[in-house]
Image (cartoon, rainbow, N blue to C red):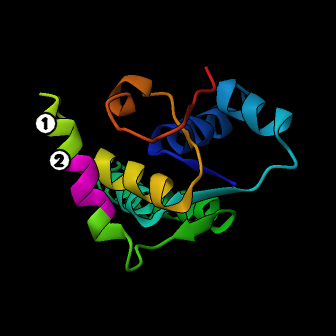
């Protein structure tokens, strides 16, 4: 299992809308047997973006369609402690990470899976996170 970041799903949706395969589609094709998941926080980011779209109902439908193909990971009893520990380690080193990115990264760390993203630099400061890129 690999967790996907919002960047991957946004790229995938854009490639599909343009009807032109790109790096996200290529990753899917080359990893056809691999199961993908996303944290509920990725779903939240996509839903928020859909709500701001020019045609929100159409965009929500597209977002929900892609989310249905993923295993959605919800926080469990391990999550809060892991988030707190990662935050403390990151800030002790003098680094910063957005709260949403840290929530997404924590879900991958807690579940022991890599995170697939186009935004490697957003997540590079997160200890114990395995990052996979597709570009």
Which residue is at 47% across, 52% downward?
109
Which of 38/48 is in front? 38
Query: Would you say residue 100 is visible in this rendering?
Result: no
Residue 71 position in % (x across, y down): 63, 67
Asked if the residues shown at circle 2 and circle 1 are in contact, with their CB atoms under 8 angstroms apart, the answer is: yes
Residue 16 position in % (x across, y down): 67, 39
Q: Quadrant of the N terminus?
A: bottom right
Compared across the picture, whether 45 is left or right of 30 comes to left
Identify whether 78 is placed above or below 69: below
The secondary structure making up most of the magenta span is helix
Label 2: which secondary element: helix
Compared across the picture, whether 109 is left or right of 19 comes to left
Query: Which residue matches tag 1?
Result: 92
Q: Which residues are magenta?
A: 82-87
Identify whether 67 is placed above or below 131: below
Which of 107/59 is in front? 107
Query: Which residue matches tag 2?
Result: 88
Label 1: which secondary element: helix
Q: Is residue 35 magenta?
A: no
Query: Would you say residue 14 is visible in this rendering?
Result: yes
Residue 75 position in % (x across, y down): 40, 73
Q: Mark 2, residues whose alpha carbon is within 10 Å: few (<14), some, or many (≥20)?
A: few
Residue 8 position in % (x across, y down): 55, 38
Which of 69/117 is in front? 117
């Amino acid at each position: 299992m690999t967790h996907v970041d919002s960047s991957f799903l946004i790229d995938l949706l854009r490639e599909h809308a343009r009807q032109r395969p790109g790096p996200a589609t290529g990753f899917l094709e080359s990893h056809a047997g691999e199961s993908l998941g996303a944290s509920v926080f990725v779903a939240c980011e996509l839903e928020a973006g859909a709500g701001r779209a020019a045609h929100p109902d159409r965009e929500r439908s597209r977002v929900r369609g892609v989310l249905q193909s993923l295993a959605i990971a919800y926080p469990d009893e391990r999550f809060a402690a892991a988030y707190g520990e990662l935050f403390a380690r990151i800030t002790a080193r003098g680094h910063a990470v957005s709260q949403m990115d840290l929530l997404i990264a924590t879900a991958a760390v807690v579940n022991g899976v890599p995170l697939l993203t186009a935004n490697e630099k957003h997540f590079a400061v997160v200890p114990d996170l395995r990052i996979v890129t597709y570009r």
